Structures are given as C-alpha cells and as structure tokens.
Amino acid sequence: MSAEEGRQRRLLGRLEADELEGLLVSDLTNIRYLTGYVGSNAVALISGPVSVLITDSRYAVSAREQARGVDVVIGRRDLLGDLAAATDRIADGARIGVEADNLTLSRYERVATALSRFTIESTTGVVEDLRILKDDAELDALRKSAAITDEALDVVAQGGFVGRVEQEVAWQIERALREGGAEGPSFEAIVASGPRGARPHAVPGDARIPDDTLLVVDMGAIWGGYCSDMTRTFVLGEPPPELVEAYRLCHRAQRVALDKARPGIEASALDAIARDEIEQGGMGDAFGHGLGHGVGLDIHERPGVRSEGKETIQAGMAITIEPGIYLEGIGGVRIEDLILVTDDAPEVISNFPIADPPA
Ligand code: ZN
Ligand code: ZN
C-alpha cells in the first residue's frame, strides 16, 4: 500500500468516527498529502464507496502518474460541475464533509448545488489532524530536506560573513539550496546582522555585515514537497556584552527545551521551559514569539509550540525548537533546530553545528 493510500485509510477511520460518509477535500496541500497530486487545480472526494480526484486537462498526464488510491477524473476548468457525476455511487442523503477553512462562500454554494443529494457538513482541520503525525515517507522527506539545508549553510558559511552584503548571502543561500537538490527555499532566507537581527522576520538588507556583532541566518529547503527550517546565529568578532549574554541565554534555553521535547508534554509547557530560562536570565521581555511550530508540507503547521498551544507533544511530530532574544537597536539571537519527536530523545535533523557561547 502506498503512503497516500495509508493516509486515505486513516482519514476514512476518522470520518467514520465523525459519522461522515466522505470528505470533499479542496485544500491543495491536503489533496497532495492524501493523493500525491501536485498541481494548482483539483478537488478530491475521499469516501468508502468511491475516492476520486478531479482535475483539469492541463494535469491529465501528471495527475495519472502521481495519484494513488483514487480514480482520476479530468473535468472542465470549474471542477465542481463534474462532482455530481463522480459521486453517483454514494447513497442519497449521505453526510459529506467539506473543508470550511478553504471554501469561499460562492464556491460553497456551487458545492451545495453539485452535491444536493447529500447532507453537507462543515468541518475544520480533519486532514490537518492527520498531518500532525508524520508517516515514514514524510519523515524521510523531512530528513532529506533538513540535510540539504545543513549542506547549503555549510557552503555559504565558508570564508566567513564579515564584509559580505546580507542580500548577497541570502541569494547564495537560495542558490546553494537549489544546487543541493531542493525544489526551492521553504521561505525567503533571513540574513540579519547587528541591530537588524533584533527583528525576528528581518528582510536581508544591502549593507555589509559588520564585525563584533551577531548574525542571524534562518533558512530552509523544500524537498519532495516537505519543508525544513533552521536558524543559526553566528558570533562575529567580539560582540557587546549584552549580545554575548543574550546568545548564552538563548543557547541554554534551546538546549533545555530540546531535551524536554518528548511525548506527553503539553506544547504550552514546552514553551514555558524555554521562556522561564530566558526570564530568569532577565531577558524575558525580549522573547516575543512562540518556541516553535510544526513543519511538514507547510513551513508553519500544527502543533503550535507556544504559550497558547493546545496540543500535546507526541512521537511522530516534526517541530522546531527556536527561542530568540531581540534587543531593540542592538541585535538579536535565535537558535532553531528541526526535530522529530520519538518515544525517546528527539531526533535532531538540523545538523549544522551550533557555536558554543563565547567564553
Ligand atoms: Zn526558521
Ligand atoms: Zn521556524
């Protein structure tokens, strides 16, 4: 059985528990997850009696090559018109779920017309619930994606950073990711030196990277559709004492939280472990964002590892551990690893070395 068929089977189990006969999947990332289809126009109906993927003629060849466990129907550009015919094996009155987060009101009205024989139920997060726990094929793709990121930073870091332009380093990162086999970057790389490093989502600038400061580099690849995400902060020369202290604190918080990222801990409690460490060091106000997030087909997905996080950490999750300390006008530090949660110690798949704090 293919990975995609396994996911469809898990979905059917979930639908049965929710007393749904089928789910009309319109989110393209969820469609990829469930069927393997990669393209810009498709809907999928996954149900016990029939599972179909409807796409248009532009994707006829690729959809038939990619899709697993579903019949491929080539419809007109507006796929919803072909939905009624594709569902003729499902009994009248069956309860069919739709993805509320993904349908516009007008699209929903057309779905309701196409599926007027059925009872339409609004659902949220059904496929996303499955995506939280990665299967073996996904874990392998995440490992590969993270390895490409490690190697790319290794290439880019050679020769040091002082005197180079942030934007040029960012471009070199993208090139190194693609040359290393990535389909592309998972987001625009962040290269932020000196005071710019105090902005968690800084855009690389056109100034040369100075000495005696910190440099934050946050980057990731996409491989096989799966994202990676890693941040390293480089200690350049002799930064001012408060930046050295911020680095030391962030480094410790990251190590401590990483060690506690094990099944059974609440995501909010994991966040608190790093946050407490930084608060005790007197820099709690400078850590504004959450500790981490899930990573998969999307760069940011569930679980949210932050103080309001609702999920419990479980084996099979892929999450980041990324505390940061941002000192306005001075600089910033963030250290981020992508990890796979296991029954035991986490498997850290970001392997570019993390520098020890300056003595
Ligand atoms: Zn990142
Ligand atoms: Zn991240």
Image (tube, rainbow, N blue to C red):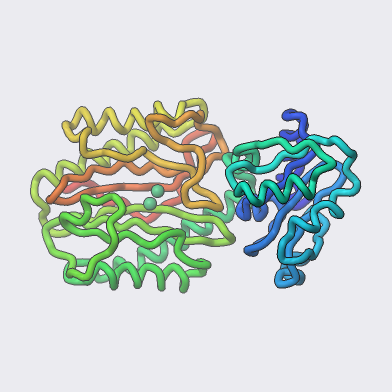
Between 354 and 287, which is closer to the camera in this rendering? 287
Where residue 10 appears, x then y in whole percent? 72, 39
Between 120 and 244, which is closer to the camera in this rendering? 120
Q: Is residue 93 left or right of residue 354?
A: right
Query: In percent of the image, x 47 and y 36: which residue is there?
Result: 345
Q: In this view, does 203 lie above or below 123?
A: below
Where residue 93 appears, x then y in whole percent? 85, 35
Q: Is residue 72 left or right of residue 230?
A: right
Query: In percent of the image, x 22 and y 54: which residue is there?
Result: 197
Q: In which quarter of the image is the C terminus?
A: top left
Residue 10 visible in the shown view? no
Query: In percent of the image, x 74 and y 28: which residue is there?
Result: 17
Query: Where on the picture, by quarter, is residue 117?
Result: top right
Where residue 213 appears, x then y in whole percent? 14, 56
Q: In this view, does 277 lie above or below 140?
A: above
Q: Is residue 49 left or right of residue 349?
A: right
Count of numbered marks: 0
Query: Where on the picture, by quarter, is residue 285?
Result: top left
Between 273 and 197, which is closer to the camera in this rendering? 197
Query: In percent of the image, x 47 and y 47: which residue is there?
Result: 300
Residue 332 visible in the shown view? yes
Where residue 97 appears, x then y in whole percent? 72, 39
Q: Is residue 116 above or below residue 80?
A: above
